[in-house]
Amino acid sequence: MTRAGIVTVVGKPNAGKSTLLNRIVGEKLSITSPKPQSTRDRIVGIRTADDAQMVLLDTPGLLEPRYALQEAMRGIALEALRDADVVAYLVDATDGDPPPLMDAARLDAPPRAPTVLVLNKIDALDTAALDGLRARHPDAAFVSATRGDGVDELLVKLRAYLPESPFLYPEDEISTQTLRFFASELVRETALEQLEEEVPYSVACEVEEFREDRSPVYIRAVLYVERESQKRILIGAKGARIREIGRVARGKIEALIGAPAYLDLWIKVLSNWRRDPRSLRRFGFVI
Ligand code: GDP
Ligand code: MG
């Protein structure tokens, strides 16, 4: 009998959720960045190996509700918790002993599903610190998401909690999300990489047209910012920055789809979209 179920990865921003998810799925599905809060959507990766299928939910992090965007993010994370067969509670081991998930996530009750504590970034710990953590958290999984250490052991632990079930998705399917969605994430990721500190969280991307029937594949994408000043920053001197974003993003999209692409990239101002429920819904936030 095969096993199949939902593994929800939760943790604070920067704990390494996206890095771990990418390693487990083996494809670049989710965004990683040194800046917190770059994963704003619930991204589904699927790992099918031997007789087990894990449907992985990345969560946007459980954050203080400060304004509409973060409320939306918390809502998405809580929904992914409810859907889980097993929860992987990922923490940065360099922060020391982690608080219980219930406290960290400010939950009223523990998640229904069993929780596996995952201490990440063990590559950045000295032996004494690591030994101490191992002694105090004997049931935890110890991993380095960037190097891959401990990930096989983690997968064994997670697999044990998956219910006996036929596979939920075709074996070769790595994701239920569309290429269109990933294309928009890659454009946004590229813009983020090339921008100064403040602007990134004001950037959303929408792919307006994705034509696989053309060669090269035609993609029209719009980067939305909140202010004219941000638009000017994105465009750069004589359009140099937007051209560079387009060039790099196109390369990533071509690697993803395995075909030449033409990226028609635009920038538009949508005032205060982060505080506007309609705009948030439009960019895929559940609010
Ligand atoms: P997320 O916000 O939880 O999705 O975290 P990311 O996956 O985006 O990672 C945040 C930062 O931590 C990035 O700079 C990663 O390179 C870094 N990081 C993730 N995993 C590890 C790890 O195992 N070791 C070290 N040293 N850094 C890591
Ligand atoms: Mg992330």
Image (tube, helix red, strand yellow):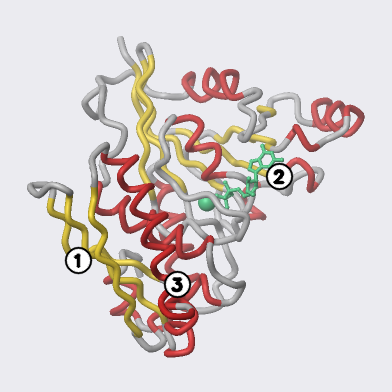
Would you call the spot at circle 2 few (<14 residues within 10 Å), some (14-19), or many (20 or more)?
A: many
Give the camera-side residue of 121 and 247. Answer: 247
The residue sitting at 42% across, 83% down in the picture is 231
Q: Is residue 212 left or right of residue 55?
A: left
N-terminal label among 3 and 1: 1
| Residue of label 2 | 92
Specify the farthest residue to the right: 128
How many angstroms separate mark 3 from mark 1 (CA)? 23 Å
Query: Of discs 3 and 1, which sits in the foreground?
Result: 3
Q: Is residue 44 left or right of residue 215?
A: right
The reply to whether the C-beta atoms of the residues labelled 1 and 2 are less than 8 Å apart is no
The image shows residue 56 at horizontal and vertical percentages of 41, 37
Q: Secondary structure at mark 2?
A: strand
Q: Determine if the C-beta at disc 1 is less than 8 A from ligand 2.
A: no
| Residue of label 1 | 208
| Residue of label 3 | 240
How many angstroms separate mark 1 from mark 2 (CA)? 37 Å
Q: Quadrant of residue 242?
A: bottom left
- Residue type highlighted by circle 1: Glu
The reply to whether the C-beta atoms of the residues labelled 3 and 1 are less than 8 Å apart is no
Q: Secondary structure at mark 3?
A: helix
Q: Is residue 30 left or right of residue 166?
A: right
The residue sitting at 32% across, 81% down in the picture is 268
Q: Determine if the C-beta at disc 2 is less than 8 A from ligand 1.
A: yes
- Residue type highlighted by circle 2: Asp
How many angstroms separate mark 3 from mark 2 (CA)? 37 Å
- Residue type highlighted by circle 3: Ala
Would you call the spot at circle 1 few (<14 residues within 10 Å), some (14-19), or many (20 or more)?
A: few
Quadrant where the image shows the N terminus: top left
Give the camera-side residue of 65 and 36. Answer: 36
